[in-house]
Image (cartoon, rainbow, N blue to C red):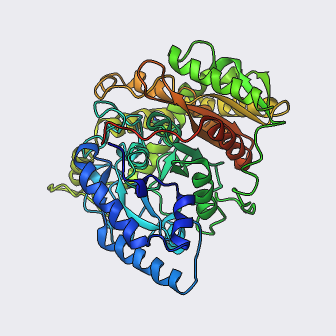
Amino acid sequence: MSAPALLDRSITDLAGALSRREVSSEEVTRAALARIEATDERLHAFLRVVPERAIASARGSDARRARGEVRSPLDGIPIGLKDIFLTKGVETTCGSRILAGFVPPFDATVVERLETSGAVVMGKLNMDEFAMGSSNENSAFGPCRNPWDLERTPGGSSGGSAASVAARQVFGALGTDTGGSIRQPASLCGVVGLKPTYGRVSRYGVVAFASSLDQVGPIARTVTDAAAMLGVIAGHDPRDQTSSLLPVPDYRAGIEEGARGLRIGVPREWLQGGSEAGVERRVREALAAYEAMGATLVDVELPHSRYGVAAYYLVAPAEASSNLARYDGVRFGLRAPARSLADMYGETRDQGFGAEPKRRIMLGTYALSAGYYDAYYLRAQKVRTLVRRDFDRAFERCDLVAGPVSPTVAFRLGEKVDDPLQMYLADVFTISCNLAALPGLSVPAGLHPESRLPVGLQLVGRPFDEATLLRAARALEREMGPSPAPEAIG
Ligand code: GLN
């Protein structure tokens, strides 16, 4: 049974239907709430649904529309938020027990921007604890499942966001991507995910994981929807010094221009048998499709990308160990009863953090400790520079780079939980884009020939050139036709 037709529509389509008054935002919102109610016991994409807040903003949108006021293409459209974004008055846990009960006193800038643009916030979506993970199994509240096969992972860490969008519970969602956490779940759930350039979107009010890598981005069912969402959330924010002053272009403007004339770099390192055969086949077919559409394929080299995972697992844990130091039972969430202050810190952190954050805190503290800083953190930072130079060199000869997102399709829950290194390798193709601070996108490239599970194509662009990625992704989407809805969730 396929999802109801209303919920199957794209944001762009629905915005049209809303302005023609074929449907109201309240009707759409109620349909989405009913869909969540009917499916989420099995899917577990949501940690918290906010029906009252949603209905209230839907009514607000309908009232404005009745007066002829439309604030953005997202006005009146149900959207989900990864539980990493602070939401005023709504518990925000970041997938961790240590933040259970934490109710933020303010909204993240991106949440504020969504709501100001009229979007209807539906609730907070499941994620790996502190965005550490690739399967959602590190969520302290139990994993979200993949709507294509409920025994499989939706990917992570923004797994709840991707699963919810794919399952037609919401029309789009925000995620964050530090090493692949938007692109990998988007790929595994058959939807579009965009990690913008570092600095393109404000991170004010976003729980920090690895501050030199974290970036916020949209997950949607179509490329144009992702472009519309990016247009709303991007832009300078005086409250985030890392946010760029560059003006935000209209991301939908050139999106239909097609792939003709684009030079697409194909990194040799990304197509050397490092992916399962069915994934590599779909990626190669997508590249051939681009050639048929008039793009030119160019061989490029990213020789240092093979050190990406190693460098990332020094930089990210080092920064995480510092960012997570603030959770000590004093200001946020959980506080364990104890006899002394020192015991309270220790007990709270012991009870509050799961195994993965503890592992990263230890790794990161070690990598930053006196005597090891130069050998590990500093060395890893130098590798980042080399990774970035590889891309700079590649972009002298091409406009964007293409390859797989994930080496495999969605894997089974439980398959990798006991082997952190295997789990880390899920991001082998996505991490270098974060290390180099570049924009990266995952677009559906068809289903795996045997398992019939989604495969994503990754496109990586020049700094702040999200527009070219969107244009190229849209060309492929048009060629392939609309991606099918997952059937396992019913
Ligand atoms: N899977 C990677 C990790 O565990 C990336 C996570 C992310 O992008 N937030 O760190």
Which residue does the image show at 51% across and 39% down from the upper left? Answer: 483
Compared with 89, 458 (above or below) is above
In which image quadrant can residue 93 be found? bottom left
Which residue does the image show at 33% across and 30% down from the upper left? Answer: 152
Which residue does the image show at 69% across and 43% down from the upper left? Answer: 469
Question: Seen in the image, is 344 located left or right of residue 186?
Answer: left
Q: Could you tell me if residue 483 is visible in this image? A: yes
Image quarter in which the N terminus is found: top left
Question: Seen in the image, is 136 located left or right of residue 287?
Answer: left
Residue 424, position as x, y percentages in the image: 45, 27
Extreme residue in the bottom direction: 67
Question: Seen in the image, is 88 located left or right of residue 172?
Answer: left
In which image quadrant can residue 315 be found? top right
Residue 23, position as x, y percentages in the image: 45, 70
Image quarter in which the C terminus is found: top left
Compared with 157, 63 (above or below) is below
Residue 112, position as x, y percentages in the image: 50, 70
Compared with 337, 237 (above or below) is below
Number of marks drawn: 0
The residue closer to the viewer here, 384 or 443, is 443
Residue 6, position as x, y percentages in the image: 42, 58
Q: Could you tell me if residue 371 is visible in this image? A: no
